[in-house]
Image (cartoon, helix red, strand yellow):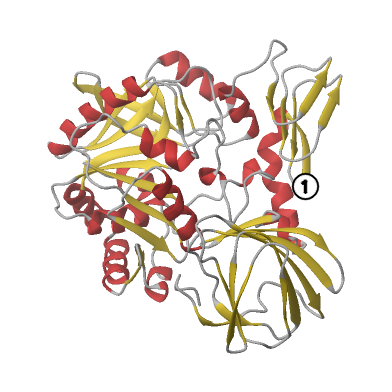
């Protein structure tokens, strides 16, 4: 059985913590591990697992690779989508990557919480057996209350023990309809998790959406392998129809089966959903970071950097990050996406990036900005190296505060250590490398007429960036 990790979401409803360039699946929201890491780690103990296949946005490739490395997961492939086309094409290219059409694919979104691992394992074992019989299995979450934020699956006849034919997939209902669904006992929340053999899925996809399958085959055939990554051909994949697994296959096939699952599942799709799964104090507050709460209840209060104090609040979400503060009523958190849309229209960077930006070599934090200057704190991992590059509009001053830097500039090389500095004039080709065994930390002061990240001309890069 091959775990297929789908990591294409943007997580806009968890802004400002989740951003376009660093969405929620890469964040440690409910434990010390990130959501991606939790998704793979909860499979520990299942027999017969092969190396996973991850499918993610091309922009997230280094984040995905690093987070898998941290938990010593060795993927069979990290497939990079140049554009998002929903879940059906993502699963199609994963199925085409499998070594055999008889391999069972366990398709898992990378941003779910599952509290009861044992119950989840039992459902997966049954799903695998049914997948090997040619069924396309989905996991239906036994609802604990009426919910209007989820799609539903209506169960049909009992096929095997704890497995039903799928009678229908139903869109997100209103509260009255959701209440009726839950009371009937015939409906489950649609989890978006699946199990089927690669061959079974591809045959059904060919039957119901042959163009999608054809484009996926072509995009994969023209893909380029780069380090651990499989880069789908952008021109070809951009022409692929966009659709979910539900619409493309599951709603049309006569082989769909639903296995009910009660395992403390949550898709952490909003701040209120995150509040549901995080431990709370005696007043019902879920608190993270440096927070003082007085006479406050049933709220989510998150501090990333600063002391956050609240007095006399209830049923609110308060989130502080290094560059943004968001305050919302818990019953309005689904509307956070409207804030993100406004930020995008205004061209604000806060919609896409945090102040701290991660790169394959490490990260940088923009600690100060002005009209013609910018100060960054840069951390370079041991053995890592930035690209050989130059800038048309800025000069740079580097001061080493920890570790040792190997600097190339204008054809010369120099080694600088703590409390030493160097100057990179505008237009000079340069490179920064950490030859040591501890992280290199430098303070960089940029000055010039334009300080955007797109003022980089790369001449060489060990990470394959253009």
Q: Position of residue 386 (x, y in %)?
A: 55, 71
Q: Compare residues 23 and 211 and report the one nearer the observer.
A: 23
- Label 1, secondary structure: give it: loop
Q: Compare residues 349 and 93 and report the one nearer the observer.
A: 349
- In the displayed structure, 462 sits above or below 278; it is below
Q: Quadrant of the N terminus?
A: top left
Q: Position of residue 22 (x, y in %)?
A: 58, 52
How many numbered discs? 1
- In the displayed structure, 459 sits above or below 319; it is below
Q: Position of residue 319 (x, y in %)?
A: 73, 37
Q: Is residue 431 left or right of residue 54?
A: right
Q: Is residue 211 left or right of residue 38?
A: left
Indicate the quadrant where residue 426 lies: bottom right
Q: Compare residues 116 and 273 and report the one nearer the observer.
A: 116
Residue lying at 36% horizontally and 68% vertically, measured from the top left: 232
Q: Is residue 396 left or right of residue 196?
A: right
Sort mark 1 into few (<14), some (14-19) or many (20+) by Cα contacts within 10 Å.
Answer: few
Q: Which residue is mark 1?
A: 324
- In the displayed structure, 401 sits above or below 290; it is below
Q: Specify the farthest residue to the top.
A: 282
Q: Position of residue 382 (x, y in %)?
A: 50, 59
């Amino acid at each position: 059985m091959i775990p297929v990790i789908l990591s294409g979401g943007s997580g806009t409803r968890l802004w400002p913590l989740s951003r376009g360039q660093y969405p929620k699946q890469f964040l440690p929201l409910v434990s010390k591990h990130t959501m991606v890491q939790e998704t793979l780690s909860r499979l520990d103990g299942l027999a017969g697992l092969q190396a996973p296949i991850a499918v993610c946005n091309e922009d997230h490739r280094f984040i995905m690779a690093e987070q898998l490395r941290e938990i010593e997961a060795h993927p069979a492939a990290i497939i990079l989508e140049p554009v998002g086309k929903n879940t059906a094409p993502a699963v199609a290219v994963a199925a085409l990557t499998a070594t055999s059409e008889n391999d069972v694919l366990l398709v898992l979104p990378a941003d779910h919480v599952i509290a009861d691992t044992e119950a989840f394992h039992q459902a997966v074992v049954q799903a695998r057996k049914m997948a090997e019989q040619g069924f396309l299995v989905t996991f239906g979450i036994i609802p604990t209350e009426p919910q209007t934020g989820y799609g539903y699956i209506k169960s049909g006849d009992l096929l095997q023990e704890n497995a039903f034919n799928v009678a229908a997939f139903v869109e997100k209902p209103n509260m009255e309809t959701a209440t009726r669904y839950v009371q009937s006992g015939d409906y489950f929340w649609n989890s978006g998790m699946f199990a089927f053999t690669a061959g079974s899925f591809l045959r059904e996809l060919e039957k119901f959406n042959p163009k999608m399958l054809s484009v996926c085959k072509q995009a994969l055939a023209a893909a380029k392998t780069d380090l651990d990554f499989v880069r789908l051909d952008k021109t070809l994949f951009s022409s692929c129809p966009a659709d979910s697994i539900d619409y493309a296959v599951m709603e049309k096939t006569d082989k769909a089966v639903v296995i009910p699952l009660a395992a403390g599942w949550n898709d952490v799709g909003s701040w209120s959903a995150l509040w549901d799964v995080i431990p709370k104090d005696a007043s019902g507050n879920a608190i993270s970071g440096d927070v003082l709460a007085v006479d406050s209840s049933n709220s989510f209060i998150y501090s990333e950097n600063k002391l956050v104090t609240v007095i006399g609040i209830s049923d609110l979400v308060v989130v502080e990050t290094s560059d943004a503060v968001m305050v919302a009523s818990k019953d309005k958190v689904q509307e956070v996406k409207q804030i993100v849309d406004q930020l995008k229209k205004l061209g604000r960077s806060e919609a896409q990036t945090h102040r701290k930006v991660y790169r394959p070599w490490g990260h940088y934090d923009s600690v100060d900005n002005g009209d013609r200057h910018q100060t960054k704190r840069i951390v370079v991992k041991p053995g890592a190296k930035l690209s050989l590059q130059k800038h048309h509009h800025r000069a740079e001053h580097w001061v080493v505060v920890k570790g040792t830097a190997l600097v190339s500039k204008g054809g010369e090389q120099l080694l600088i250590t703590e409390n030493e500095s160097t100057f990179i004039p505008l237009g000079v080709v340069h490179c920064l490398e950490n030859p040591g065994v501890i992280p290199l930390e430098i303070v960089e002061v940029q000055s010039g007429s334009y300080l955007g990240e797109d003022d980089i001309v790369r001449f060489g890069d060990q990470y394959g960036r253009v």
